[in-house]
Image (tube, grey):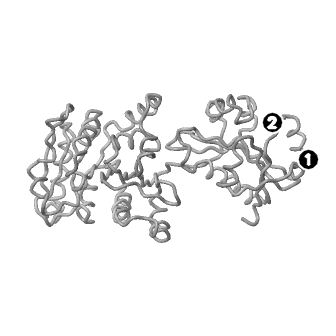
Amino acid sequence: MNNAFSHNNELKPSDLPGILRYVRLFRRQTFFIGIDEALAQTDTFASVLKEIAVLDSLNIRICLFFYGCKQGVFSLVNSGEYLKLSDVEESFEFNQLKLNKSHLETESAKAHLTEVIKQSFEEQTLCLITPEEHSINFEEHLVFETLCQSTQVHKLILLTINECPVINGEPLTNISANELKNNLLEASTGQLPSWFLSYSHLAIQAIEQKIERVHLLNCNIHNALLNELFDKVGIGTMIHSNKYEIIREADINDVQALYNLTKNSVKRDTLLNRSIDTIHERISDYRVYEIDGSIVACTCIHYFEEDLSVEIGSVFVQPYYNGRGIGRKLVNDACDKAFKKGYRSAFVLTVNAAKFFQLKCGFTNAEFEELPKERQFKYKENKRNSFVLKKNLVDR
């Protein structure tokens, strides 16, 4: 992940309501945090421990484990060298469980493992699981399955020193487990680094064990862990089983949110002014883009039946989420929706965003006379002198 991308994701004071929402949501949830042995040997590891201490202070149940442990670091893991917190202001206690093969061989042994983990949580202490022998590998299916079955796990967080993968020029910030399993690993492996493919298998395994979200983080970025967990977009790659980013039809409950979302852009004269009453009347025309339950973008579709064309308007993305392909996804979704209804072309009228529609969405210049008659009249009426752009929906 490049520094420019990470800088834009630093949490800001204005994000406080969203942060507090996650604080309430995460309270008493269980996070399994896996630490790459390569990270544990870096200078940034002490700051990662500080972040883990913050999570612990928020009454989040944390189970730590090291993975990828090789001979050279095995003794350090077991001696606790990695958890010396002399320079960490926040301190936390932990119960250490040394895992060996016997924990995996019988149901009674697995039950004992479960009890140890639950006891740590009841005592409000962090649980540290370390391998007692070199043959234990946390990436192995049986080991990981046993840990997941020991308690309800809400998140698996894998801390690495690897940069966020980039697909088609955009950071892979999130992807559903089904998409990753059925499409990405098969069709786009050439675009993905080998380390990500190996982590992906572990993430899919976690999803199959009913863990809803898996996070892969480059902890060479300052405060990566906190930025990932307390921001809707985050700073790493999240693999999820539940709906995280969705495009849906707006409903009456979204009117105020849509008005609040677009009003600042109206003040800058980049969107046509629409009152809250107008939005209310046309709410069925709106499509919204949600991230983790919050509306961050919208568009409006107006149908002209006589011409079998649609106007795509009010495309707006919160500035904080610009550059992530959200606007393009909304426009493509609107075009797909119109085409499925039998419409043959789409057009946009824009003052400032012509390049976006041309370069990102495949629209081309059009003449005023190509607009539906009804729309030509309104075009003259508003006197904005917008660019007219058009897209053929049939031959895409």
Up the image or down, 141 lies above or below 99; here it is below
Q: Amino acid at mark 2?
A: Arg
The location of residue 122, given as percent across then percent down, is 20, 39
Mark drawn on residue 294 = none
Q: Are marks 1 and 2 in contact (CB under 8 Å)?
A: no
Residue, x 40% and y 36% (percent of image)?
22
Foreground label between 1 and 2: 2
Which quarter of the figure has residue 365?
Answer: bottom right
Above-or-below relation of 120 to 192? above
Q: Residue at 75%, 61% (x, y): give it.
A: 393
Q: Which residue is mark 2?
A: 384
Q: Return the x and y of residue 161 as percentages of the image width and height.
A: 30, 53
Q: Residue at x 18, y 34 (%)?
A: 91
Classify residue 87 as left or right of residue 298.
left
Residue type marked 1: Lys
Number of residues whose C-alpha sits closer than 10 Å to that of mark 2, classed few (under 14), some (14–19) or many (20 or more): few
Q: Quadrant of residue 70?
A: bottom left
Position of 360 with respect to 234 (left or right) is right
| Disc 1 element | helix
- Position of residue 393 relative to residue 64, above or below, is below
User: Which residue was labeled with disc 1?
Assistant: 373
Q: Nearer the viewer, residue 100 or 215?
A: 215
Foreground residue among 193 and 378: 193
CA gap, disc 1 and disc 2: 17 Å
What crowding class fits label 1: few (fewer than 14 Cα within 10 Å), some (14-19), or many (20 or more)?
some
The mark nearer the N terminus, 1 or 2, is: 1
Measured as percent of width and height from the top left, residue 13 is found at 43, 28
Q: Residue at x 77, y 54 (%)?
A: 346
The image shows a total of numbered marks equal to 2
Q: Observer-nearest residue: 320 or 174?
A: 320
Left or right: where does residue 196 sit relative to residue 365? left
